[in-house]
Image (tube, grey):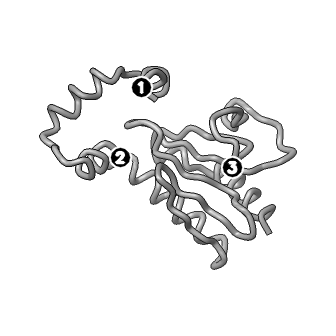
Amino acid sequence: MIVSLTDRTGKSLEQWSAVVGKSGKAKHGEIVAWLRAALRPIYDALMTKILAFGTDIEQAPKKGYMSLRRQTQFATLHPSTKTRFDLGLKLKGIEPTARLEKAGSWNAMVSHRVRLESVKGVNEEVIRWLRAAYDAAE
């Protein structure tokens, strides 16, 4: 994890330690909450749209992400870096685009990933992909 930290976040472990040191936070939970607070609006926007699809959605929090299921998993929500939220989608047979990239080795549980850096990224296109993944998970 330490080796890939710079590639994944753009900062080394030493740089992240300095950022956290300046935050004034000391406890692990406080630090995690502080690092992810800026991403909460993206999560909230996604969940508002997703929960409107139906009442059969199971939310399964995992160690580093939220898994969303019906009969099977259809999406994952990942606060990946301090400034980026990743949406994993299970969309078999859908060709990747510039925005809807192939998940590859990022997460074997989904087929595609969408990188979101602001609430503006949660647009109609993303909601259509989410709805397609939800519908396919019957």
The structure residue drawn at horizontal position 37% and vertical position 37%, both measured from the top left corner, is 82
Q: For this rendering, which residue is in front, 39 or 127?
A: 39
**Vertical side of 134 occupied by 92: above or below:** above
Q: For this rendering, which residue is in front, 15 or 49?
A: 15
Whether residue 131 sits left or right of residue 46 in the image: it is right
In space, the residues marked 2 and 1 are separated at their CA atoms by 19 Å
Q: Quadrant of the C terminus?
A: bottom right
Residue that badge 2 annotates: 36
Residue 24 in percent (x, y) is at 12, 40
The structure residue drawn at horizontal position 53% and vertical position 57%, both measured from the top left corner, is 66
Residue 104 in percent (x, y) is at 71, 33
Residue that badge 1 annotates: 2
Q: Secondary structure at mark 3?
A: strand
In space, the residues marked 2 and 3 are separated at their CA atoms by 21 Å
- Seen as rendered, the residue at the extreme left is 24
In space, the residues marked 3 and 1 are separated at their CA atoms by 26 Å
- Seen as rendered, the residue at the extreme bottom is 55
Whether residue 46 sits left or right of residue 55 in the image: it is left
Residue type for callout 2: Arg
Evaluate if marks 2 and 3 touch, with contact meaning CB atoms under 8 Å apart: no
Q: Nearer the viewer, mark 2 or mark 1?
A: 1
Q: Earlier in the sequence, mark 3 or mark 1?
A: 1
Residue type for callout 3: Leu
Whether residue 102 sits left or right of residue 58 in the image: it is right
- Seen as rendered, the residue at the extreme right is 93
Residue that badge 3 annotates: 89
Q: Quadrant of residue 21?
A: top left
